[in-house]
Image (cartoon, helix red, strand yellow):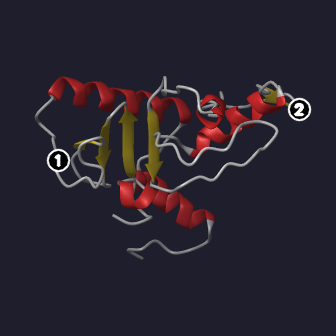
Amino acid sequence: MFKHYVHEGGISTPLVAHWPKGFTPRTNAHAACHVVDILPTILEATGCAYQNEVGGHEIQPIQGESLMDLFKGDEWERDQPILWEHEGNAAVRLGQFKLVRQYGQAWELYDMEADRTELRNLAGMNPKLEAEMAAQYADWATKIGVMEWDEALPRLLAAWNMESVDG
C-alpha cells in the first residue's frame, strides 16, 4: 500500500540521525519507531521537561518514547504500542505484530518479523491478541479524539468551504 494508507508501504520511512557530540554513529538500526518519538528524544537530549499547559491551556499528554538509547547503540525496546489513524485508516503496532485496517474494512493482523511486506494476513488466528490490540486502538482513539472518517470528512470539507464529495 502507498502513502495514504497505514500499511508498511504507506508508513515505512528511514530516519537519519546525526549528533557527533551526543551519540556514536552506527551503520543502521532496525526498530519500530514513529514520528511521535522525536519530541521525547529531543526533550531527553536537551534535558527539558514537557509542558502540560501553555498560557492556561492544557496540552495533550506527550506520546512517544525517547530514541536516545537506540541512537547510542544501547539495547532499546518499545514499551508502549504505536497507534495510527490517517483518513480513516488505522493501525496498532505491538511488538512484532501489527493490526491494521483500511477505512471501512476489517482488521488485518501481520507478524512484522516474518512478513514485513504484509502479504500473509493472520486475522482470525489469534483472536485474543487481535481483541487486545483493537481495544488499545479504541482506547487511544477515544483519548485523543479521533473521529470516524465518515463524520470527519464532511466537517473538513465544510471547514475548507468545499462541497461534499456527494454534492
* Percent coordinates x, y for residue 4 in the rendering: 43, 64
Q: Residues within 10 Å of mark 1 (few under 14, many from 20)?
A: some
Q: Residue furthest right?
A: 55
Name the residue carrying label 1: 121
Disc 1 on helix, strand or loop?
A: loop
* Percent coordinates x, y for residue 33 in the rendering: 51, 41
Q: Is residue 24 left or right of residue 148?
A: right
Q: Is residue 124 left or right of residue 74?
A: left
Mark 1 to mark 2 CA distance (whole Å): 47 Å
Q: Amino acid at mark 1?
A: Asn
Q: Is residue 159 left or right of residue 146?
A: right
Q: Which circle, 1 or 2, is nearer the viewer?
A: 1
Q: Is residue 90 above or below residue 11?
A: above
Disc 2 on helix, strand or loop?
A: loop
Number of numbered discs: 2
* Percent coordinates x, y for residue 58 in the rendering: 75, 28
The answer to which quarter of the image holds residue 109 is: top left
Quadrant placement of the C terminus? bottom left
Q: Residue at x 64, y 30 (%)?
A: 66
Q: Amino acid at mark 2?
A: Gly
* Percent coordinates x, y for residue 39 in the rendering: 70, 38
The answer to which quarter of the image holds residue 65 is: top right
Q: N-terminal of the two: label 1 or label 2?
A: 2
Q: Is residue 33 left or right of residue 165?
A: right
The answer to which quarter of the image holds residue 99 is: top left
Q: Is residue 83 above or below residue 49?
A: below
Name the residue carrying label 2: 55
Q: Residue at x 35, y 54 (%)?
A: 7
Q: Residue at x 58, y 27 (%)?
A: 74
Q: Residue at x 32, y 34 (%)?
A: 96
Q: Residues within 10 Å of mark 2 (few under 14, many from 20)?
A: few
